[in-house]
Amino acid sequence: DIEIKVIGRRAGERLNESLFSHRETIVPTGLPGVEGAVPPEVSLPQMQEIVVGLQNSLKERDRAEAVRILSCMDSVMSSVAPAPMMADATHI
């Protein structure tokens, strides 16, 4: 057997970790101590506005603005649930 010695918390060590984005809505799951998260909804007009802004920055060859928009897109889209896949009837 191996002896386990509890020495306490190390300097800077966290006792918990946030697994949810500040953009998500926390919801109960029905299980004690377990929560779920609902990602934010990004509407089609919001997506279109982002894409148009990216197109304009690329057309104007404004690299800094294009990078800023791409960074924004990454942070927005990374917390959004993917759309459900639709079965393609031609391949069934």
Image: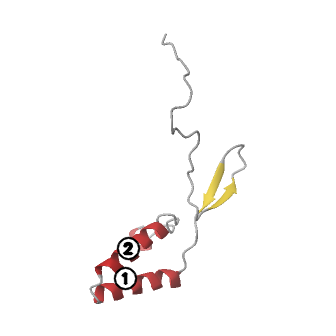
Q: Residue at x 58, y 72 (%)?
A: 41
x and y percentages locating residue 64 in the rendered image: 32, 78
Q: Residue furthest left?
A: 61
Label 2 Cα neighbours within 10 Å, binned few <14 / some 14-19 / many ≥20: some
47 or 87, nearer to the observer: 47
Callout 1–callout 2 Cβ contact below 8 Å = yes
x and y percentages locating residue 79 in the rendered image: 51, 64
Is residue 86 in view from this perspective? no
The disc labelled 1 sits on which kind of residue?
Leu
Quadrant including the C terminus:
bottom left
Q: Residue at x 49, y 66 (%)?
A: 82
Left or right of residue 83: residue 26: right
- For marks 1 and 2, the one nearer the N-term is 1
Is 74 drawn above or below residue 27 in the view shown?
A: below
Rendering quarter of residue 67:
bottom left
Q: Tag 1's secondary structure?
A: helix
Q: Tag 2's secondary structure?
A: helix
Q: Could you say which disc has been placed on residue 54 in the image?
A: 1
Rendering quarter of residue 16:
top right
In this figure, what is the number of numbered marks? 2
Q: Residue at x 41, y 82 (%)?
A: 51
Is residue 57 in view from this perspective? yes
x and y percentages locating residue 6 in the rendered image: 56, 21
Is 33 drawn above or below residue 84 in the view shown?
A: above
Q: Residue furthest front?
A: 11
24 or 14, nearer to the observer: 14
The disc labelled 2 sits on which kind of residue?
Leu
Give the residue at mark 2: 70
